[in-house]
Amino acid sequence: MKVMIRRTDAGLSAYVPKKDLEEPIIKLEKEELWGGTVTLRNGWRLLLPDLPHDTRLPITVEARKISEEG
């Protein structure tokens, strides 16, 4: 699914246009963000593509939904 990752005053945020959903990213598997999973506040876990650590934000990427916790 297409996901836009951006940096806000509160931290990193993920926006899913198809669901009109924007949620803060509350957990990172990898400190550099790319190539690992992120957890959104609503419980979704997304696998992000492996991109260079200095990739500029905001960016729209193809992410894979792993699961919903809880």
Image (cartoon, rainbow, N blue to C red):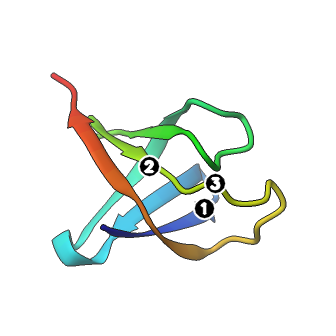
| Residue type for callout 1 | Thr
* Label 2 Cα crowd, 10 Å radius (few <14 / some 14-19 / many 20+): some
Seen from the viewer's position, the closer of residues 41 and 37 is 37
* Mark nearer the N terminus (2 vs 3): 2
Q: Is residue 56 left or right of residue 21?
A: right
Left/right of residue 25 with respect to residue 34 in the rendered view: left
Placement of 20 over or under 64, stated as above or below:
below
Pointer 3: what residue?
50
Q: Residue furthest front?
A: 50
Residue visible at 62% across and 74% down?
A: 58
Q: Helix, strand, or loop for circle 3?
A: loop
Instruction: Pick whichever, 64 or 23, lies toward us.
Output: 64
Task: Write the residue at 64% across / 50% down.
Answer: 34
- Which residue: 43% across, 46% down? 47
Give the total of numbered labels. 3
| Residue for badge 1 | 8
The residue pinned by badge 2 equals 24
In terms of image quadrants, where is residue 30?
A: top right
Where on the picture, by quarter, is residue 67? top left
Could you give the CA–CA distance between mark 2 and mark 1, rounded to whole angstroms?
A: 9 Å
Which label lies toward us, 2 or 3?
Answer: 3
Marks 2 and 1 close (CB-CB < 8 Å): yes
Residue type pointed to by label 2: Pro
Looking at the image, is 13 positioned above or below residue 41?
A: below
Counting from the top left corner in percent of width and height, residue 31 is at 72, 35
Q: Amino acid at mark 3?
A: Asp
Whole-angstrom CA distance, mark 2 to mark 3, is: 20 Å
Circle nearer the N terminus (1, 3): 1
- Disc 3 packing (10 Å; few <14; some 14–19; many ≥20): few
Q: Nearer the viewer, mark 1 or mark 3?
A: 3
Location of residue 57 in the rendering, given as x and y in whole percent from the top left corner? 68, 71
